[in-house]
Image: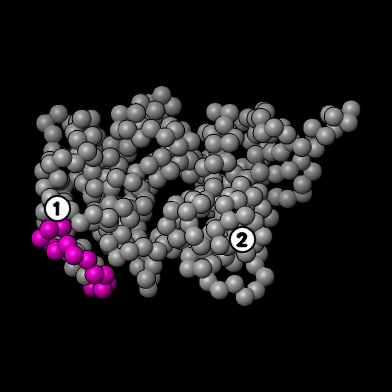
Amino acid sequence: MSKTSALNEQSKRYVMRKDKIVAELDSKNRLLDVKANAPYHIKNDAFELWEQSRQTDVNRTNLRYLRRMLGLGSRDTIGALKKIHYASLFDTFWVKEVGSTLAWEDVKFTENPLFLHALCRHDITENLEFKSPEHSTLGSFEKGWKIENGSWYLYKTGKNEEIWSELFSSRLLGHYLGEKIVNYWLDENFIVCESFINQDKDECLEHYHSIGGEDTEENKIIEKFTQLGLGDLIPDVHQMLYSDALVLNGDRHEFNFGIVNSPCGIRFAPLFDWNMSMIAYQYPKNYKRHHDVLIKGVKSLKIKQNFEVSHSVIETIYHELAETGLSIKATKNEIVEFILSAQDLLRTKNPANIPPNLC
């Protein structure tokens, strides 16, 4: 073997799924020998996009500060990813250098020494370990992962209106859709949810960005799922679009929904992230929502209303949240009007064929 060939061989890397090679990379990040169980980005010959999809938001102040304390540039998200071998809590993919003796058991996260530092910029008084899921956690809000009894919990900060909106939306929709909605609760001043990914079962979350790109226009999402042979999941897509329109969630971007891929098959991921819904940013001047673009999108697809929200359920959840002490400006009657007026607008005479809610 020539020196050049030997150098190229040493420069190769492997994209792993647990301890199985799913793709090879040459020294220029060109993909070689991609397997069927690789991430969609990798199967589409887009390593850089896969890499991008694992980077943290550079606008998260606590992480910029933390990277500096760990000896990296404050915006060096790629450098941080390399330190943890591209591992994430959301799947079992990682990157292995040729000749490395590392295995999945060495790479996967079993603790998080940076939890408080990422969540609230805890004073750094000791030598910190780099290995942490914080370096591959998406989103612009300050947050941190905490492990308790073998389960991972995501803690997030936010203003009262943001936290209230996420709690209300998840409780309201969870009442009708059950496990299709991620459950959120309060722990002191933080909003918390449990991870829905089971890495022991080789479950991998693939954000819509990996299968459909950046265009999240309603009809484009449907087209992409159809093209990929995921037509069985379209009823779940319809349910997501309907639910988002009902609670005015305008933040369902390409990294905020997706599919869970596992040896047992593919399923639509539970819906998460509601902290920009309802009254999170703008106290509505018109609770009637006649000009709501999300409602127009649902009606253009003729999506069926497959659950009906009742006045009493809205009131019950409103009173439950009042007991938490969260202070908001919206009254109970305004919230009732907000939801029920949207529900009335969402009704259509020619619905798509969606099975009724079975939860």
Query: Between 65 and 202, which is closer to the camera in this rendering?
Result: 65
Question: SS class of the residue under badge 1?
Answer: loop
Q: Indicate yes or no whether the magenta region holds residue 210.
A: no
Magenta stretch, residue numbers = 323-335
Name the residue tied to disc 1. 285
Q: Is residue 312 visible?
A: no
Q: Crowding at label 1, few (<14), some or many (≥20) Cα neighbours within 10 Å?
A: few
What secondary structure do most residues of the magenta stretch adopt? loop
Dots 1, 2 in contact, CB < 8 A = no
- Residue 347 horizontal/vertical position (percent): 13, 38
- Residue 253 horizontal/vertical position (percent): 37, 42
Name the residue tied to disc 2. 68
Q: Indicate yes or no whether the magenta region holds residue 328.
A: yes
Q: Is residue 26 left or right of residue 358?
A: right
Mark 1–mark 2 distance (CA, rounded to whole Å): 43 Å
Q: Is residue 351 left or right of residue 37?
A: left
Question: SS class of the residue under badge 2?
Answer: helix
Q: Residue at x 13, y 63 (%)?
A: 332
Q: Earlier in the sequence, mark 1 or mark 2?
A: 2
Q: Residue at x 48, y 44 (%)?
A: 205
- Residue 202 horizontal/vertical position (percent): 55, 46
Q: Is residue 113 visible?
A: yes
Q: Quadrant of residue 325?
A: bottom left
- Residue 6 horizontal/vertical position (percent): 85, 33
Q: Crowding at label 2, few (<14), some or many (≥20) Cα neighbours within 10 Å?
A: few
Q: Judge whether 310 appears above or below 39 on screen.
A: below
Q: Judge whether 350 appears above or below 155 on screen.
A: above
Q: Is residue 259 left or right of residue 41?
A: left
Q: Residue at x 58, y 36 (%)?
A: 48
Q: Amino acid at mark 2?
A: Arg
